[in-house]
């Protein structure tokens, strides 16, 4: 369609004879590409009143319309056939070397690959996961490796969801869009990014359900590292062995987890990846979230916690209403905002009041919080002071300080960002982290082997600035929507 249209324009401008017939411009569908409505049974299960149901449907239909090809529940790429069971983590199960990008929103002159590979749960059970690779048009020239290879950034995303439909690889903008993957690819890096197990592929090779291990620094670190191992086997001649490790929020904890898993390198299991590690950038890592907001984190974590602690029952943490709403969330594969609406609508009725009296909450938090362990240096952590009203800043700073006091393992910098909230920790420091990545590839020594603190202040007074982006990239790839695109013209 697009090709024909361009050919017509070309013919028209070349011969200046008859002008092409432009497609009739049509406004974007305001109802997005989904029209989900709750069934009567679901309304009853969730004890949803009409206004709450309508609000949830609005958000869910928006979320679903952001999924390319209808997302994992409809896209056959994510459906594994029942073939021979794989035997080791990092094994390749399916490769789409060139993903047709037309229904994604990725920038012009970037390219997408997707693959499915094996990873493990925190406890070592072999399971499948999906990942994407976002390619630059030209590779950034860095370091000493062959210049026909693109330098790798291993990216761990923040909370996108808890079910198959939450997979960034199926999101038209790869969920973080310009904030991270698009920026990296356009700067000449190749982005290797896991969805995390449980997001993307929902059914394993033996027909079993693949659950998400939400906010688990260990399982998410495994997902990232095994994705990298698989990507290297798929594209040995296209991507560098050296890599920089980056993550934000849930993924900030995951990326910190990557550095801890590499520092431990139990049984020399990660020798292949440890030696090529150049360092980690951590943005606003998720720490102590369960205790800060159990109304949402207890359902998100609890629904799959039996994978870690087999005796755990969801009723240890949730009220009957909380359990019913979690069941409803599972049925609709709701993401972060859907579940916030769902749980916060009755915030005081969701958790079992005794949720924090059993050992699960504190043991889980200790196990999954990053920090207070040896790490693989160098690391840099960017943290805004306005993240969750300052609570996240305090959590990050104390994790940094106790890690440095008890487990100093080399260069670690804590960068305070006055006036900056959770997501803008990346927007506000783009120059600094792009430089940091480039310096690592160029083997530039880090300034100090110690733990240091620094501050990046805004150029104008902090309150002069736009706080958050107020638009999102909406797919407009049909011919009758071209008029909305700058790139649609001559
Ligand atoms: C719109 O949604 C339908 C149904 O979910 C899906 O099959 C289709 O691929 C989506 N359209 C695009 C352009 O992604
Ligand atoms: C997949 O194959 C295994 C044996 O290899 C079998 O036990 C299992 O039931 C099959 N699952 C499905 C969903 O067909
Ligand atoms: C999984 O690992 C955790 C933490 O090491 C441990 O407490 C738990 O018993 C293990 N669970 C299973 C199912 O092996
Ligand atoms: C949930 O909140 C609504 C609105 O405040 C209230 O009417 C309803 O009774 C609550 N449901 C439960 C089970 O507490
Ligand atoms: C459990 O949380 C409640 C608030 O939800 C708090 O009042 C109580 O002190 C906590 N108990 C423990 C043992 O931490
Ligand atoms: C963060 O720590 C500072 C210094 O200890 C304290 O004054 C402030 O109240 C804390 N903020 C939050 C939200 O806990």
Image: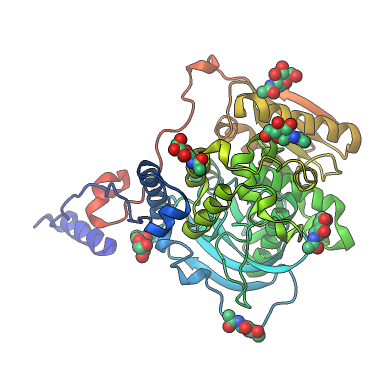
Q: Is residue 2 visible?
A: yes
Instruction: Provide residue 323's location: percent of width, then percent of height.
Output: 58, 52
Residue closest to the far top:
461
Instruction: Provide residue 382's location: percent of width, then percent of height.
Output: 67, 32
Instruction: Provide residue 204's location: percent of width, then percent of height.
Output: 61, 72
Placement of 152 over or under 371, stated as above or below: below
Placement of 71 over or under 56, stated as above or below: below
**Residue 484 placement, left or right of 332:** left
**Residue 333 placement, left or right of 192:** left
Give the residue at x 32% y 47%.
487
Give the residue at x 22% y 58%.
10
Counting labels gives 0
Give the residue at x 55% y 62%.
200
Q: Is residue 275 visible?
A: no
Which quadrant would the N terminus be assigned to in this image?
bottom left
The one of 462 and 363 positioned closer to us in this rendering: 363
Instruction: Provide residue 324's location: percent of width, then percent of height.
Output: 54, 53
Placement of 4 over or under 246, stated as above or below: below
Give the residue at x 64% y 45%.
298
The one of 300 and 221 positioned closer to us in this rendering: 300
**Residue 139 placement, left or right of 173:** right
Residue 420 appears in which quarter of the rendering? Answer: top right
């Amino acid at each position: 369609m697009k090709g024909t249209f361009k050919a017509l324009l070309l013919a028209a401008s070349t011969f200046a004879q008859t002008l092409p017939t432009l497609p009739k411009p049509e406004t974007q569908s305001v109802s997005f590409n989904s029209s989900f409505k709750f069934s009567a049974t679901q309304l009853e299960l969730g004890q949803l009143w009409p206004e709450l149901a309508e609000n949830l449907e609005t958000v869910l239909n928006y979320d679903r319309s952001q999924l390319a090809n209808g997302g994992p529940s409809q896209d056959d790429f994510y459906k594994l056939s029942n073939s021979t069971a794989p035997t080791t983590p990092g094994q390749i199960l399916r490769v789409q070397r060139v993903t047709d990008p037309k229904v994604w929103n990725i920038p012009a002159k970037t390219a997408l690959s997707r693959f499915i590979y094996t990873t493990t749960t925190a406890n070592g059970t072999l399971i499948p996961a999906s990942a994407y690779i976002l390619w630059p048009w030209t590779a950034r020239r860095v370091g000493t490796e062959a210049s026909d290879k693109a330098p790798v950034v291993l990216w761990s995303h923040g909370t996108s969801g808890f079910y198959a439909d939450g997979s960034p690889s199926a999101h038209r903008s790869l969920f973080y869009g310009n904030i991270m993957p698009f920026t990296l690819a356009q700067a000449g890096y190749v982005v290797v990014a896991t969805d995390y197990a449980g997001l993307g592929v929902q059914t394993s090779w033996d027909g079993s359900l693949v659950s998400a291990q939400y906010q688990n620094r260990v399982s998410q670190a495994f997902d990232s590292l095994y994705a990298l191992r698989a990507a290297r086997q798929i594209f040995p001649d296209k991507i560098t062995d050296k890599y920089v490790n980056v993550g934000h929020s849930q993924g900030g904890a995951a990326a910190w987890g990557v550095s801890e898993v590499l520092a431990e390198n139990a049984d020399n299991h990660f020798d292949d990846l440890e030696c090529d590690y150049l360092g980690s950038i951590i943005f606003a890592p998720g720490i102590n979230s369960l205790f800060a907001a159990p109304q949402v984190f207890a359902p998100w974590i609890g629904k799959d916690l039996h994978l870690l602690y087999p005796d755990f029952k969801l009723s240890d943490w949730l009220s009957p209403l909380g359990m019913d709403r979690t069941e409803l969330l599972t049925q609709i594969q709701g993401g972060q905002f859907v579940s916030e609406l769902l749980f916060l609508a009755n915030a005081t009725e969701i958790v079992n009041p005794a949720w924090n009296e059993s050992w699960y909450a504190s043991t889980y938090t200790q196990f999954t919080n990053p920090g207070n362990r040896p790490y693989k240096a160098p690391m840099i952590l960017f943290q805004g002071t306005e993240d969750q009203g300052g609570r996240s800043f305090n959590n990050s700073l104390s994790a940094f300080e106790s890690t440095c006091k008890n487990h100093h393992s080399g260069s670690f910098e804590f960068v305070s960002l006055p006036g900056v909230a959770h997501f803008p920790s990346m927007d506000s420091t783009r120059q600094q982290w792009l430089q940091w990545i480039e310096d690592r590839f160029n083997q530039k020594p880090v300034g100090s082997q110690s733990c240091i603190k620094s501050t990046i202040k805004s150029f104008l007074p902090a309150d002069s600035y736009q706080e958050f982006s107020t638009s999102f990239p909406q797919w407009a790839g049909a011919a009758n929507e071209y008029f909305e695109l700058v790139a649609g013209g001559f």
